[in-house]
Image (tube, rainbow, N blue to C red):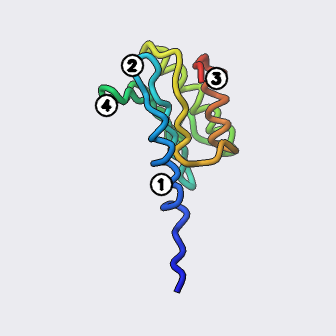
Amino acid sequence: MIKKSSRDSLRRKRHERLRLRVSGSAERPRLSIFRSSKFIYAQVIDDTSGHTLAAASSRESDLAGGPPVDAAKAVGRALADRAKAAGVSAVVLDRGGYRYHGRVRSLAEGAREGGLDL
């Protein structure tokens, strides 16, 4: 009998492979994205110290609402503002094993519009 892997387990494998190459440092932290069926979450992480420098999600009342792609763009802009307040101007994108498409792409574009260098 052939055993089929779930979508989430396949995504986790892709994310593990991606994390072998992508790592955040103090001068260029990692922008990590997680996408659920309802919400999108993003955080800027310094992997050398293991601290989250800024975070935003579409669960926040001022960022929620509207089409999911527009909410993701608003999350990207808010994250960029919070990261700049924390002294971060450039990040490395960690798309979390998701395709650079739809909500993930919209969040990245919102972060660029907010002034982050991706």
Task: Count neighbours of disc 4 (C-alpha within 10 A) and say few if under 14, some if 14 to 19, many if 20 or more.
Answer: few
Q: Of the residues shown, which amino acid type is indicated by label 2?
A: Ala
Q: CA distance from mark 1 to mark 4?
A: 20 Å
Q: Which residue is mark 3?
A: 112
Residue closest to the eye, 52 or 14: 14
Closer to the eye: label 4 or 3: 4
Residue of label 4: 50
Identify the mark nearer the N-term, 1 or 3: 1
As measured in the structure, the alpha-carbon distance from the residue carrying label 1 to the one carrying label 3 is: 26 Å
Q: Residues within 10 Å of mark 1 (few under 14, many from 20)?
A: some
Q: CA distance from mark 1 to mark 2?
A: 25 Å
The residue lying at 52 percent from left, 40 percent from top is 33
The local secondary structure at tag 2 comes to loop
Residue sitting nearer the eye, 42 or 26: 26
The amino acid on which the numbered mark 3 sits, given as a three-letter code, is Arg
Picture quadrant where residue 4 is located:
bottom right
**Secondary structure type for disc 4:** loop
Q: Is residue 13 above or below residue 2?
A: above
Where residue 78 sits: x, y (%)?
Answer: 55, 26
Q: Residue 26, which numbered label?
A: 2
Look at 58% across and 40% down and name the residue there.
Answer: 64
Give the residue type at disc 4.
Gly
Give the CA separation, mark 2 to mark 4. Answer: 10 Å
Badge 3 marks a residue whose secondary structure is: helix
Which badge, 2 or 4, comes first in the chain's sequence?
2
The amino acid pointed to by label 1 is Arg
> Which x, y percent locates residue 115?
61, 16
Q: Position of residue 28 (x, y in %)?
A: 47, 20
